[in-house]
Amino acid sequence: MAQNTIGANGQILRDARSRYRTAHREESGAHGAYESETKRAGGTPRAEVDVRREPAPAAAAAHFGPEAGDVVVRARRMYDGDRLVQLADTWVPADVAEAAGIEQVDTGVGGIISRMTEAGFRQVEVIEDVQQREATAAEADAFGVDAGSLLLEITHVGYTDAGRAVEVTRHTLGPGWTLRYSVPLD
């Protein structure tokens, strides 16, 4: 099964081919893909999580539609041991977050995607846009790089079978990541 790996030099390979599958996210009681992958790679995952409500920012509202209103924000600082490796901000429409019960820090085995599935908001498609951009001063400080250093950013949007966007996550990756994708051909 495809998975993330962490090399001896700290290089992280993020393998998107199976990371969002239920069995992968919930493996050994993990609370989501990052925890499962990091443990399997021999790392020590931990996250600092801040959960709040606020009006949908433009980047999320573009996917949720003009009636987006308030969203639940899950702002995470994700570590392997003491090393910050990722900043991840997730926006979820308030009605979805309420139905899925994901307004607390601990969202249980499988994380928010499993809770959404249980509440009737099963994600059947994920679209990820990857871009390279300059680190803000705050990001540079957090990752220990110079302001303006180039970082990778993944914008992840999860859709239900009805075509509704129920999750927008912006992953900002610290230094040392490689991304792997697989595209089926006919």
Image (cartoon, helix red, strand yellow):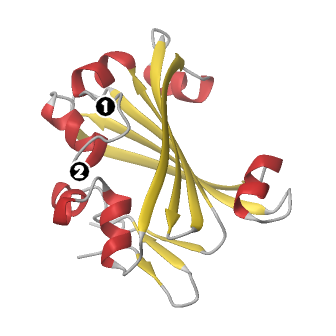
Q: Secondary structure at mark 2?
A: loop
Q: Is residue 110 above or below residue 182?
A: above
Q: Nearer the viewer, residue 20 or 47?
A: 47
Give the CA separation, mark 1 to mark 2: 12 Å
Q: Amino acid at mark 2?
A: Gly
The residue located at (86%, 57%) in the rendering is 147
Give residue 132's position: percent from left, percent from top.
Answer: 69, 58
Q: Residue furthest right?
A: 147
Which quadrant is home to the C terminus? bottom left
Regarding residue 147, the answer to whether it shows in the image is yes
Write down the residue under mark 1.
102
Give residue 50's position: percent from left, percent from top.
Answer: 50, 36
Q: Which mark is residue 110?
A: 2
Q: Residue furthest bottom?
A: 8
**Residue 11 vs residue 64: left or right?**
right
Q: Secondary structure at mark 1?
A: loop
Give residue 111's position: percent from left, percent from top.
Answer: 28, 46
Q: Nearer the viewer, residue 163 or 177?
A: 177
**Residue 116 vs residue 173: left or right?**
left
Q: Which mark is residue 139?
A: none
Give residue 184's position: percent from left, percent from top.
Answer: 30, 66
Which quadrant is home to the N terminus? bottom left
The residue located at (35%, 62%) in the rendering is 35
Give the image quarter of residue 117: top left
